[in-house]
Amino acid sequence: MTVRAVVKGVGHYLPERVVPNSEFENFLDTSDEWIRSRSGIERRHFAAEGQTTSDLGYEACKMALADAGMEADEIDGIVVATSTPDLTFPSVATMLQSKLGMTRGFGFDVQAVCAGFVYALTNANALILSGQCKTVLVVGAETFSRIMDWEDRATCVLFGDGAGALVMQAEVGNGDSDDRGILSADLNSDGRYKDMLYVDGGVSTSGESGKLRMQGNALFRQAVEKLTSTAHTALSKIGLTDDSVDWIVPHQANIRIIKGTAKKMGVPMERVIVTVQDHGNTSAASIPLALSVGVAEGRIKRGDLLVTEAIGGGLAWGSVVLRW
Ligand code: UT7
């Protein structure tokens, strides 16, 4: 008997305001053509004034719970991946508990920047496999628009706001790779690269939340190799190869990174879920957003083998292999 953490519901939320690339031409030396050709981004959503990360997460959770046909009081734990919490503390997860009316169980946040959702999913898997929880809500929610330097054209055109959520529940499988649910995971980080992507403020330094700084080109050079390698490690743990993959659901930072990784894995782009053109880079929210959109469009179906992979500040990177 093998316990698996199986997806029971999925949901997402994007703030109403859509910002096309052309809007940046009004106040920056940039162009729609540059942003599209270098990143693949065409538009992104920005949260309204006063709309917080937990507000976005709440909408995604409601949709995921409805999809699972569950009530909030059936959830044992909430794991939220975010680098843009409403407050320094308490956690966004506890804010979600209160918004959802969930008075039992527990919630906590995980901070691994753009790799956050992969880390959160891996944590949720461990909580379920250890018997600590039967059902876990896993959320990626971000308001990166709040940490942009609007004078830095190399970063502020790339990021967006949004949230996605999965309801994961324990189910008994056969112990082989035909099982539904999370089949394997691989997590990595290397703090030697901490200056490649960081925020220049924080509680114990400036006392302010700070603005995002990125050496885009240096990070770009790390991305494809590390993403391919982590996906291969996770697949090999369960004796699978690239040929078994139905869908790559990558972190949505740059279409050139997404294409480069798919090419290295020998997976055609028809089998990659791409949302970067519509969402921009939503950091920890990008994978659950892409999952939810992929399901809503009828592309990802029950029984499909998915590989999610992500890299971001830290550097931190990783992947999860799961059967939908
Ligand atoms: O989610 C976390 C992980 N993040 C990533 O993985 C991001 C990885 N990096 C990237 O996606 C890409 O490096 C970028 C999209 C950020 C940049 O693309 P690039 O092809 O690496 O461009 P670059 O940074 O080498 O810059 C090329 C040129 C520079 O001008 P010079 O020095 O060649 O004259 C930049 O100043 O493009 C210039 N530039 C811009 N021009 C117009 C930078 N930003 C802009 C802009 N509009 N918005």
Image (spheres, rainbow, N blue to C red):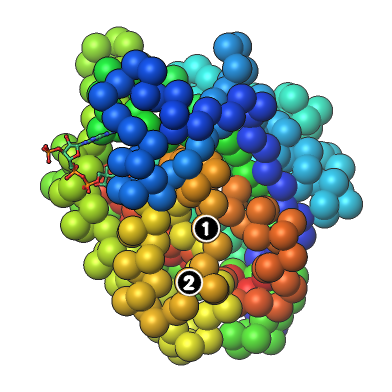
Q: Is residue 191 above or below residue 271?
A: above
> Quarter-wise, where is residue 199 in the image?
top left
Left or right side of 297 for 237 = left
Question: Residue 75 appears in which quarter of the rendering?
Answer: top right
In the rendered structure, are the residues bearing label 1 and label 2 in contact, judged by CB atoms less than 8 Å apart?
Answer: yes
Residue 269's tag is 2
User: Disc 2 residue type?
Assistant: Met
Q: Which residue corresponds to the image point at 74% horizontal and 56% vertical from the top-left? A: 296
Residue at the image position 58 percent from the left and 54 percent from the top: 290
Mark 2 Cα-neighbour bin, 10 Å: few <14, some 14–19, many ≥20: some
- The image position of residue 314, as x and y in percent, is 26, 44
Identify whether 98 is placed above or below 127: above
Rendered-image quadrant of the N terminus? bottom right
Check mark 1 vs ligand 1: CB closer than 8 Å? yes or no. no
Give residue 64's position: percent from left, percent from top.
76, 47
Question: What secondary structure is found at the residue carrying circle 2?
Answer: helix
Residue to which mark 1 is pinned = 274
Q: Pick the residue in front: 59 or 215.
A: 215
Q: Amino acid at mark 1?
A: Val
The image position of residue 81, as x and y in percent, is 51, 41
Quick check: which quadrant has ligand 1? top left
* Nearer to us in this view, 185 or 135: 185
Q: Is residue 186 above or below residue 14?
A: below
